Image (cartoon, rainbow, N blue to C red):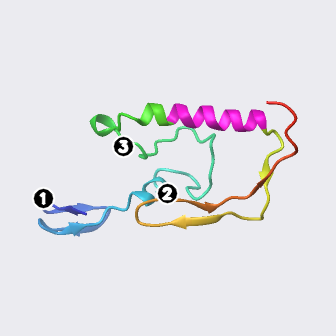
Amino acid sequence: MRVVKGDLEVHGRHFKAGDRVLVIVNAANFDPRRFEHPEQFDVTRDPNPHPTFNVGPHCGLGAPLARLEGQIAITEVIRRFPDLELAVPAVQPVDTLVMRGVRSMPVRVAAITTW
């Protein structure tokens, strides 16, 4: 929740000083003005100006670590389980005001013979 400091207009909406605004971060990466086909998951999207870790002086200090952890984890899963596939037609989403993700995502892999 944020409080507007002074009268302003944003994308045709008028706000007065003192108005309360609920900023839903979950919607930020789905802005069709910033992303072509924002509803599609695309790891190759380039450029990808998503605000997940914020920007500029407000950028989270853990952002580079989180990106590196994700890159390492996804690379290792693909390397170790090259035949990984969804075991169901669709995942069960969880979508709240605080976070967006999946409730469950059953997968299928072949027998593991070596690590």
Could you tell me which quadrant the N terminus lies in? bottom left
Tell me whether circle 2 and circle 1 mark residues in contact (CB < 8 Å).
no
Residue 30, numbered label: 2
Amino acid type assigned to the residue bearing label 3 in the image: Asn
Amino acid type assigned to the residue bearing label 2 in the image: Phe
- SS at circle 2: helix
Residue at (46, 42) in percent of width and height: 49
Decide if residue 47 is on the left or right side of residue 88. Answer: left
- What range is drawn magenta here? 67-80
Could you tell me which quadrant the C terminus lies in? top right
Quadrant housing residue 38: bottom right
Give the prevailing secondary structure in the magenta stretch. Answer: helix
Q: Which residue is mark 3?
A: 54
**Quick one: label 1, few (<14), some, or many (20+) residues within 10 Å?**
few
**Quick one: label 3, few (<14), some, or many (20+) residues within 10 Å?**
few
Q: Is 33 colored magenta in this rendering?
A: no
Q: Nearer the viewer, mark 1 or mark 3?
A: 3
